[in-house]
Image (cartoon, rainbow, N blue to C red):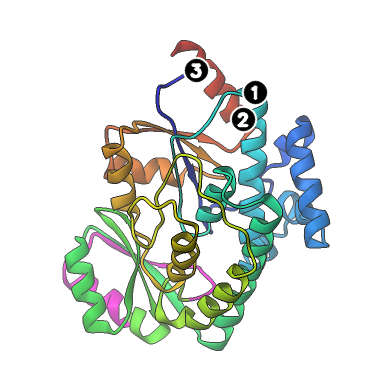
Amino acid sequence: MPNKIGFLFPGQGAQYVGMGKDLFEKNGSARSVYDKADQILGYSLREICFQGPEDRLKRTAYAQPAIFVTSLAALAVLKEKFPELAADFSAGLSLGEFSALTAAGAISFEQGLLLVKKRAEAMEACSQKYPGTMASILGLSVADCKAVTDEAGCELANLNSPDQIVISGTLESIDKACKIAEAKGAKRVVPLKVGGAFHSRLMQESRQALETALKEVQINPPQGIFIPNASAQKVSNPAEIRDLLAKQLTSPVRWIETMIRAQEEGIDFCLEIGPGKVLKGLAKRSAPAMTVEPCGTLEDIEKIESLFVQK
């Protein structure tokens, strides 16, 4: 097993119909996570995860709890196979911050899931009230993308990697920004199929709703290093964590800096815990010396077993 290990947790967009099904069917620890989630939520989240339909799963109100629970189910399987496994570093992309904090013992599973539910519902309501969208710009620097958003009247939303920046804003401003980015020489501009203008000022009301919900939640200092999206700086103080979780909804996700900070802390091996392999791809471009192994399926976890044996 590597000397230092980081845990990375995916955000909205990583979901797919069938995620977590193999974990649920073949592992009791994972099954208990889904059972507990269904009890807390009052509906069958597992049914949405395993059977969809896709249109329902991709709705913000369902996608976020589904990814959170699937990530924690995968972690439960990992912990069962490696009881001594502990993260020296934890981070999550957007929604994934709640998974990271739960994994690090800062928030209980029940409180984490209820927070995610309230966050997702508030974001969905905000999106319906203030329609907006997002787009991914490939091949322009952060500075060039900032110039694009300033001119178009939208905002930087996700600083994913040096060559992939996501922007967020009103439908009109994003349409304008896409044309400006293409004129500036972007390799590709991809409008995203998302429910709203996340990580922008259009999410202000959802931020206020989350701030209210966070006041009722017990937050403990996380185990190991935790890097939040909004500051990309180490934080352990519960009051600061509470503020940054809310701030994140209207601020850019500073993922490039998060990966660089992880390397500065001596983390060169991370597990991407949850559905998909998005974070593995982003790490290649922001922190090429870092190894990121996906852990979202039983097959993934079996590969990790053999890898740990070799190490």
User: 124 or 241: which is nearer to us?
Assistant: 241
Determine whether, in the image, residue 255 is placed left or right of residue 66.
left
Determine whether, in the image, residue 167 is placed left or right of residue 309.
left
Q: Amino acid at mark 3?
A: Phe
User: 118 or 241: which is nearer to us?
Assistant: 241
Kindly state the secondary structure of the residue where label 2 is placed.
helix
Q: Measure the alpha-carbon separation of dots 1 and 3.
A: 11 Å
Determine whether, in the image, residue 149 is placed left or right of residue 224.
left
Which badge, 1 or 3, is on the more N-terminal residue?
Answer: 1
Q: Measure the alpha-carbon separation of dots 1 and 2.
A: 5 Å
Q: Toward which corner of the image does residue 52 lie, by quadrant?
A: bottom right
Q: What's the mark number on residue 81?
A: 1
> Which residue is identified by label 3?
308
- Is residue 285 depicted above or below 219 in this figure? above
> Which residue is identified by label 2?
78
Provide residue 23's location: percent of width, then percent of height.
71, 36
- Which residue occupies 54% across, 43% down? 104
Q: Amino acid at mark 1?
A: Lys
Q: Which residues are magenta?
A: 176-196
**Which quarter of the image is occupied by the C terminus?**
top left
Provide residue 163's location: percent of width, then percent of height.
25, 54
Q: Amino acid at mark 2?
A: Leu
- Which residue occupies 37% across, 86% down? 172
Provide residue 213's location: percent of width, then percent of height.
62, 71
Kindly state the secondary structure of the residue where label 1 is placed.
helix
Q: Measure the alpha-carbon separation of dots 3 and 2.
A: 12 Å
Kindly state the secondary structure of the residue where label 3 is placed.
helix
- Is residue 71 depicted above or below 295 in this figure? below
Q: Can residue 187 be found in the magenta stretch? A: yes
Determine whether, in the image, residue 187 is placed left or right of residue 110.
left
